[in-house]
Amino acid sequence: MREQILAALSQYGSPALFAVVMIAAIGVPLPITLLLIVTGSLISQGVMNFWWAIGLATAGSVIGDQIGYAIGRWGGSELVDRFTRLLGGPERLEKAQSTARRWGGPGIFFSRWLVTPLGPWVNLASGLAGYPWMRFLVWDAIGELLGTLIFVGLGKVFSDRVLALDAMLSDLTWAIVALLAAVFLGWKFFSSAWTKQADDGG
């Protein structure tokens, strides 16, 4: 799959980039970070135009995110159930909904580029939670633009070390996810302990 996607990028350029990032933003697991890094490498070689690539990648990501949000907001229970199963199950959706309610706009922003595996879940959960669409769009567009600039820019600067850079960023992303999960679990533990202590003291 990775080889086919990269071959399509080399052959069709920015239109392929737009299509792939849009599909991935909806929830299909595709190597988007690697794709953007390779895009930066192709730009450094003069194969692609920098601003066309940035514009189309950002637009594709935002459109895909809006589709995920719309499914959660207006898709109905049957479509939401199917989409949830596609993403990995209702348990993960419940966690994403809790995160969306707690973090709001900043959660949307950071899931665009810092913890990208959570992106499709946050889109769906934001729609289900009734998060205002215009706010979602603004946070989404800013985050996707920043993420695209970061990964394409890294690929452009480190064009001779694309695969090593992708592996390092992938490890870093999952480390951040694990850290956030640990912080959340720790907060829940101490919060429940404090509540119990207060009840006992009362």
Image (cartoon, rainbow, N blue to C red):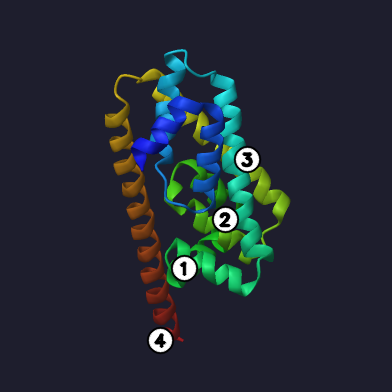
What is the C-alpha distance between the residues marked 1 and 3?
26 Å
Give, as a three-letter code, the residue at label 1: Arg
Quadrant in which residue 7 is drawn = top left
**Mark whose residue sits in front, 2 or 1:** 1
Quadrant in which residue 68 is drawn = bottom right
21 left or right of 181 in image: right
Label 2: which residue? 123
**Mark whose residue sits in front, 4 or 3:** 3
Give, as a three-letter code, the residue at label 4: Asp
Q: Position of residue 160 (x, y in %)?
A: 30, 19
- Above or below for 51 versus 167: above
What is the C-alpha distance between the residues marked 1 and 4?
42 Å
The residue drawn where x is 29% and y is 36% is 168
- Above or below for 114 versus 128: above
Label 1: which residue? 85
What is the C-alpha distance between the residues marked 2 and 4?
40 Å
Label 3: which residue? 141
- Kind of element beneath mark 3: helix
Q: Is residue 145 in sight in this rendering? A: no
Q: Is residue 16 in sight in this rendering? A: yes
Tell which circle, 4 or 3, labels the residue nearer the N-terminal end.
Answer: 3
Pick the front one: 193 or 11: 11
162 left or right of 61 in image: left
- Kind of element beneath mark 1: helix
